[in-house]
Amino acid sequence: MTDAVPSRSPRRSNPVLAAFSSVCLPLAAFGVALPVTLPEFYATYVGIPIAVVGYVFMAVRAIDIVVDPLIGAAMDRTKGRFGRYRPWLAASAPVLMLSALMIFVMVEPGAGPLYLFGWLLVLYLGFSVGTLSQLGWASVLAPEYDQRSRVYAWWQAFNIMGVIGILLLFAWATQTYPTDKAAGAHIMGWAIIVALPLTISLALAAVPEPVNHSAAPHGGLKAYWDIIRRPTVSRLLAADLVLGVAPGITGALLFFFFDQIKGYDRSAASILMLLYFVGGLAGAPIWAKLAARIGKHRALSTASLIFAGLYLVATALPGGNFALTAVAMFIAGLPYAAGLFLLRAMMADAGDEVRLETGVERTGLMFSILSATTKLGHVFALIPYAVLGWIGFQAVPPEGGNSETSLLALQAMFIIVPALLIASAALILRRYPLTPARHDDIRRQLDARDASASPTTP
């Protein structure tokens, strides 16, 4: 099902956006499992040394970052009656289902690093195809400036629901089967395997993909570099990098911080993390509405400054009052989603600018570059581990004797560094050139050009 792009695209209904965004539920589950649960599962249950597990994940992530732009460029070259992005999303389903089966369910204790490397590489490549095709599809689903914010707000809301859902499912499995060390991984794997074909089929059946009339990409690496150094794109990539490193540091150090500094065990820390994500889900519509009123870049700058302040307050509260900390973490999470969905909506806007000025479609490539900066941010977020190791911090009980210096460093890296990084996004987005008025003009010119290229509507 494809539509030619009219002068003004229809406002997508809530059921259509829900069907489109439902794919985020299993994809977000992968996003939690890959950095959080799988490394520990393969180190403890499967028996691969923790250092080797880390090397395998880093090697696969390095390959994934290099391959992402190739996948994005291939998507941009795709043309057919079913659309540019829909065939790629459909193709990702069997790859992800098979890799989830092998990574989460079929693996047995004693499997070696090569098993992990091979299936993890397949999983990451399928995950890249799935996420990039969905983001590209979203960019053409609602080309108008304000409606695009709405599409990506739905997308982010379902991402957060996927994170919350898989964490609750994992917690239920581990508590129900406390002696089964594989129960959590198995339930995550089966949930993903069941949800993937259902949600992707729903999206393919219920959601159209409007057609972009543009020439095939050309120019090789130089043309790609010309995109990266554009003021619009470079600012988005820089903002995405700092907003990716900050939560990466928070996630990497969260259990250490609440255990060593605040005195909360892993179960309590997990509840606090869930409340933080619930806050992000509740706050997403706020930032979408603000973006419609003052523009995406101003809304994101505002959200970043508020986020930094709320995060400082929530993490600096003294331990011992769980109820107060829980409320603070929920409130601190309210701006969490803003950067995730507004940056992707803004990159889609930048794709329109590139298509107008070059005459070619590079949205898939641009989202792949944005994905690469996000992944680089996650890699940089592991630096605090090295710093803590260098100053002698150890993963021991709170009374285990960590020095005051190492505990002070832990607090600084968990509280101050993420807050500064989040606030810096507002500085990066100062004088952002792609304003709502500028984008409206771009859309008028693109619609006129597309109408002349396709005078009749199929």
Image (tube, grey):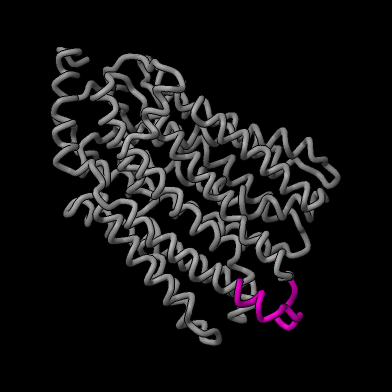
Residue at image position (63%, 45%) is: 189
Q: Is residue 92 left or right of residue 239?
A: right
- Does the stretch in magenta take in 400? yes
Magenta span of residues: 395-409
- Does the stretch in magenta take in 199? no
- Residue 164: in sight, yes or no? no
Say which quadrant the N terminus sits in.
top left
Q: Is residue 343 left or right of residue 388?
A: left
Residue 244, compared with residue 23, is above or below; it is below
Dominant secondary structure, magenta: helix
Report the number of discs: 0
Residue at image position (31%, 39%) is: 231
Residue 359, compared with residue 418, is above or below; it is above
Residue 300 locus on image (x, y percent): 30, 55
Taking the view exactly as shown, the residue that stands out farthest to the bottom is: 320
Residue at image position (46%, 34%) is: 368
Res 403 quadrant in image: bottom right
Residue 315 locus on image (x, y percent): 48, 75
Residue 454, compared with residue 9, is above or below; it is above
Residue 386 locus on image (x, y percent): 68, 59
